[in-house]
Amino acid sequence: MAEKTLIDKLALLYIEDGKLLCSMSHGKDTCYIPGGKREAGESDEQALRREIMEELSVELVDGRSGTMARLRRRHTASRKA
């Protein structure tokens, strides 16, 4: 049986007027949802704020974050994309 690894990431799911915010890297044709991995010692909120600033050059405003949920999906190393 393949070893399972937990992938821990944060993402900003911003929905307005039924549309989901996504971004596209320069020179690529695939969209992604902004976010990423937390660095050592960061809280979820600190990591998400940093990732959003790095990826979108946007500062998340205090008190504006909505529900934070933790979703877990076990990734199997042998699984093919």
Image: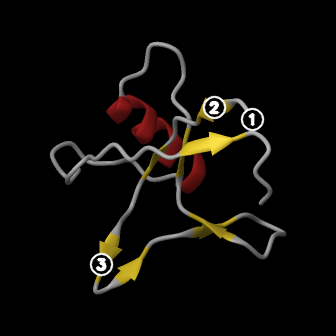
Closer to the chain start, of discs 2 and 3, is: 2
Q: What element carries label 3?
A: strand
- The answer to whether 55 appears left or right of 28 in the picture is left
Q: Residue at x 41, y 55 (%)?
A: 12
* Separation of residues labelled 1 and 3 (CA atoms): 40 Å
Residue 5 is marked as 2
Q: Which colour scheme is used?
A: secondary structure
Pointer 3 residue: 16
Closer to the chain start, of discs 1 and 3, is: 1
Q: What residue type is labelled 1?
A: Ala
Give the total number of marks visible in the rendering.
Answer: 3
Q: What residue type is labelled 2?
A: Thr
The location of residue 50, given as percent across then percent down, is 48, 36
Q: Which residue is drawn at 81% across and 70% down?
A: 28
- The answer to whether 81 appears left or right of 35 in the picture is right
> Which callout, 1 or 2, points to the residue nearer the camera?
1
The location of residue 42, given as percent across then percent down, is 42, 20
Pointer 1 residue: 2
Q: Residue at x 33, y 48 (%)?
A: 60
Q: Verify CB contact (< 8 Å) between mark 2 and mark 3.
A: no
Q: Which amino acid does label 3 sit on?
A: Glu
